[in-house]
Image: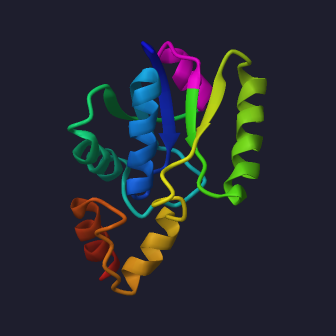
Amino acid sequence: MCQKAIYPGTFDPVTYGHIDVIKRAVKLFGEVIVAVAKNTSKTPLFSVKERVDFIKKAVKDIPGVTVVSFDGLVVDFASKNKTNIVVRGLRMISDFEYEFQMALTNRKFNDSVETIFLMPSQDYSYVSSKLLKEAASLGAKLSCFVPACVEVALKKKLSH
């Protein structure tokens, strides 16, 4: 163990699937930096600060996890943090094509950075932030998918 890995993403919002991947990554690498993307082609519902805060609350009892925001290329962020391991979660086979393409592109930018794919528990393999935002907007109860602070914030933000 005794390695450090980066787990980058938008996390808009963080789900129990993300948290499951974080726990799996910590078991494998000992230290995980959850890197919340600032600049993204997506239009996040929550600010970077909100997303960082949600994750910090969700992982506060998991030793070896640091949560920060970042801007720019993941491979540059990994190099700045003295690691060559990027963790990505794969839920369904449909995720694979995009993640594989991103991993190969990152390898072209910096061939010393390796991408490790981790699958969440089958309990969370179908959960997506996009789907949960849609369900929240329709009034669904989300407590089995996201931490309580996220559910409250989702309902508040989407009720306006």
Question: How far across and how far down the image is residue 7, in percent?
Answer: 49, 35
Question: How far across and how far down the image is residue 42, in percent?
Answer: 57, 57
Q: Residue at x 74, y 42 (%)?
A: 100
Tell me which corner region of the image, top left, top right, bottom left or bottom right, holds residue 73.
Answer: top right
Residue 47 forms part of the magenta stretch: no
Tell me which corner region of the image, top left, top right, bottom left or bottom right, holds residue 75.
Answer: top right
Q: Residue at x 61, y 49 (%)?
A: 90
- Up/down of 40 relative to 2, above or below: below
Decide if residue 109 is in sight here.
Answer: yes
Decide if residue 160 is in sight here.
Answer: no
Left or right: where 86 falls relative to 124: right
Question: How far across and how far down the image is residue 139, in percent?
Answer: 33, 85
Per the rendered image, the range of residues in magenta is: 73-85
Q: Residue at x 22, y 46 (%)?
A: 57
Left or right: where 65 falls relative to 135: left
Q: Residue at x 54, y 22 (%)?
A: 78
- State the quadrant of the N terminus: top left
Left or right: where 109 falls relative to 48: right
Tell which of 81 and 18 is nearer to you. 18
- Up/down of 105 relative to 113, above or below: below
- Up/down of 134 relative to 30, above or below: below
Which residue appears farthest toward the front when viewing the image? 122
